[in-house]
Amino acid sequence: MTKKTLLQISAVGGAALLLSACASIYSNELEGEKAPDAAATTPPTNAATAPTADNGLPKPKTNPLPDPLPPMALAEAKEDFVKRTSAKFGIDPNSIRTVLNQATKLDSVIALMSKPAETSKTWAQYRPIFITDARISGGRKFIAENRADLEKVESVYGVPKEIIVAIMGVETGWGANMGKTNVVNALYTLGFFYPRSGDPTKADREARREAFFRNELMELFAMGKRERLDITTLQGSYAGAMGYGQFMPSSYMELAVDGDGDGRADLFRSKKDAFASIANYFVRRGGWVRGGTVTLKATKDAAAADLTPESLDPIYTVQQLADKGFRPMIPVTASAKANVFRLDGVSGPEYWYSFQNFYAITRYNISKHYGMAVYDLARELSK
Ligand SMILES: [Ca+2]
């Protein structure tokens, strides 16, 4: 099947996601969706909260948060950071110390990170927030203006231009809203002063998230060195996500690529770099399959139980899912790998297959609503 066919295949329900200034950082698993924070970051649910398979079949992949850091006084923690960052990336410790000593703890960042997760919206509530006429027309215009560059990236990576453009639209309105928070300050705040709720059941996760952000700050120093950027001037989301596609520093280091041939990956100013980097993210982080199906609507046998807990990881064969009572509305090879998730649409429950390429979209933000929103917007853009 061609890509266009695949995008058009299903009569989807839509999806919606509210864009906060940035992309999302970790997302609240499958249902929660607090407003997205940092995007291409997909930081990880940790093992305690990650969805698990229910029956002896392979377990979904998890991407655990780092171990908590040993307790240290602030001055000691900062010096430890300087030493480790310097040793790991070969950066002059004094330059790191200077930046760190000038960094500011931002109460606004603490407040945003402490905000309770939004109550879960249903798909029916979500979609109209997310898929708007303005976003559809803006996306079509953006494609028209960048068609040749987008098609070049599409041919190299196999990721449809509509998917790349949908991601950029969701994350930053095609660059109009890349975030206005100083990235060093954001990551310093979350990496050294990550807010604690006081809830003992959340303590471990909060400590791990602090370690995650401190590591992102380390990666930011490495990024400054490699890309020859003054990191103290960079702006992004309150969680430290940057540029057109809202990459966290570690994703920037691992997955950003030079799309315009000037020798640097500049996701702040180069659309060509952003297109290639987003596509590279899909392929390398999500295992995007060129020409592969994203999602298909499924029917559910009356007697079939919902798959709980839900997972988007394509760990079942289509035959195994059929045995559980879920059948695709158009025939699919029985050995194809997928999972099934539920959306609560305007007409009630809907069941959808998550194939590898749906899973890939959700590596950007681990959320079925995010995945469906991007898919649905891409489908609109392909018309
Ligand atoms: Ca470049």
Image (spheres, helix red, strand yellow):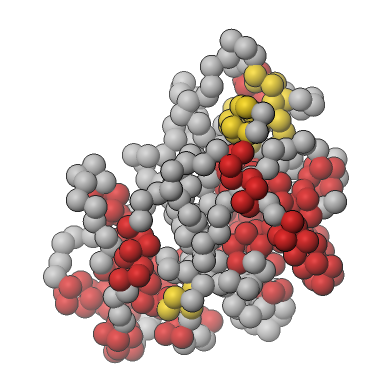
Which image quadrant is residue 144 in? bottom right
Farthest residue, direction left: 73
Task: Tell me which residue sits at (30%, 71%) in the image.
Answer: 107
The reply, left or right, for residue 193 in relation to residue 28 is left
Farthest residue, direction top: 303
The reply, left or right, for residue 118 in relation to residue 130 is left
Residue 64 is at least partly visible in this image = no
Give the quarter of the figure containing the N terminus.
Answer: top right
Which image quadrant is residue 257 in? bottom right
| Residue 377, above or below 47 | below
The image shows residue 228 at horizontal and vertical percentages of 52, 86
Q: How many marks?
A: 0
Which image quadrant is residue 220 in? bottom left
Residue 378 is at least partly visible in this image = yes
The front one of 132 and 164 is 132
The image shows residue 267 at horizontal and vertical percentages of 60, 74
The front one of 339 and 162 is 162
| Residue 83, above or below 33 | below
| Residue 87, above or below 111 | below
The image shows residue 33 at horizontal and vertical percentages of 48, 47
Task: Tell me which residue sits at (81%, 42%) in the image.
Answer: 8
Task: Tell me which residue sits at (82%, 47%) in the image.
Answer: 3
Task: Tell me which residue sits at (44%, 75%) in the image.
Answer: 181
